[in-house]
Structure formats: structure tokens, C-alpha cells
Image (spheres, rainbow, N blue to C red):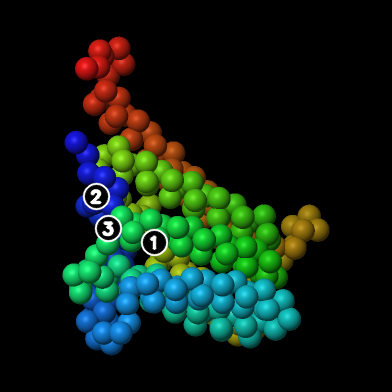
Amino acid sequence: MNATPPDAPRNKQFLLARHEGRVLEWIARRLPARVMPDHMTAIGVLAAFGIAGAYLLSNGDKAWLWAASALLVVHWLGDSLDGTLARVRGIERPKYGYYLDHLVDALATAVIGLGLGLSPWMLLAVGLVIVVAYLVLSINTYLETYAFGVFTLGYARLGPTEARLGLIVLNTPIAAGVGLGFHVGGLGLTVLDLIGLAVAGAMAAGLVGRAARNLRLLAEQEPAGRVSG
């Protein structure tokens, strides 16, 4: 019988996963006892709304991108430390944590994507495409967990931490005054639009590849025409 999603072993394939895990554990062991995992989750959610607000305010002053980058670090701490803190202290709540973590991840992704799409640096359509692609990949991950009993995080070795770092890297030249905009057939675009579309395309390709592999493995486990029972 496959493990249920909250109890399924996690397979982290991110580029920075190993180093990130050590840093997070070091921080978690030094947090005051009064700081609880739910506090970190709340900080992550507030930071996500702050990031969206900073992107929106950058319509008036691109200096707000510095705030967006700082809040991306805060969001990383809140989003990543809640589970680490619970494990370090031995106070895990697998089902509660699984449900809350993925609920707020979806919310944060939608909010940040919307904020970025309402900024002058990315078309709203591109931001929404990225959000939809992320949510579909998340659904596929949950289905894989049910079908195979392993919670595989990340596609092409990229995950939330790498995405945040990428946004910070892109925010920096824009906030510093480097022009990244251009026009194609009268449509104003920026480098972020091109990168966003490339990321969405890579996510779609990753989904197709994973889905094809999953269906092949499941077909081998459950051949067509086999009598169940």
C-alpha cells in the first residue's frame, strides 16, 4: 500500500536543497522557543502579499523592487522554516502541516504572480500563465504522491528557492536603472516577459515528460485488461 500524502517520503531534487537544508536547520535551532511553526507560516503569507504590493507600487517608483527582493528573502524564511522548525523540535503535525503548507503555497504563488503581472515589468497574461503552470505542476505532484507514495519536489532541479533567487537577480538591474524593455509589433515587453514565457514553457515540457513517465509506470503496474480483485 502506498504511503498517504502527509506521510510519504520527500524526494527533494532542487539544486540548492542540500545547502538550504543545512542553513534552515541552523536557523531553526537558534530561534526563540516562543516562535512556533505557525508563526513562520504567517510571516511567509504576509511577505507574499508584501511582495505583490511592492511590485504594484513599482509602477510609481522602481525603487520598490528593492523592497520586493528583501521580502522574497523574508518569504523564503517563513515558507521554509515552518516545517524545519517543527522537525527540529519534534512537534510535527503531518496532516495539518501538509494541508496548510500546500494551501498557503498556492495562495502565495497566485498573489505574487498577480502582483508581478500588475507591475510594469511583466504582462498580466504572462504572470497568470506562470501561476496556472505552477498550480498544474503542484496538482501533478500531489497525484504522484498518491499513486507512488513518494512526494517528489521540483521539476528540472528547480524549486521555490531557485525561483525566488531568480526574481531577486532580475529585480536588481531594473531597480538599479538598467532598461530591460523593448517593443515587438507595437507590444511593449520586457526581458521578464521572455523569461516568464520560457519558464512556463519549461514547466509545460516538464509536466508532459513526468506525466508520460507516470502513465508508463502505472500501465506496467496495472496492465489493461487485467481482472482486479
> Gap between marks 1 and 2, in whole Å?
15 Å
Q: Quadrant of the C terminus?
A: top left
Residue carrying label 3: 94
Can you identify the residue that label 1 sits on? Answer: 101
Q: Residue furthest right?
A: 186
**Quarter holding the N terminus?**
top left
Residue that carries the numbered disc 2 in the rendered image: 8
Amino acid under label 3?
A: Pro
Question: Residue 145's x, y, as percent?
Answer: 31, 44
* Residue 169 visible in the shown view: no
Where's residue 168, x and y in %? 50, 75
**Residue 34 lies in quadrant:** bottom left
- Residue 150 vs 90, above or below: the answer is above
Residue at left offset 23%, top offset 51%? 7
Residue closer to the observer: 180 or 47: 47
* Residue 187, x across and y down, in percent: 77, 58
**Please, what is the three-letter code of the amino acid marked with disc 2?**
Ala
Q: CA distance from mark 1 to mark 3?
A: 10 Å
**As displayed, is residue 210 above or below residue 81?**
above
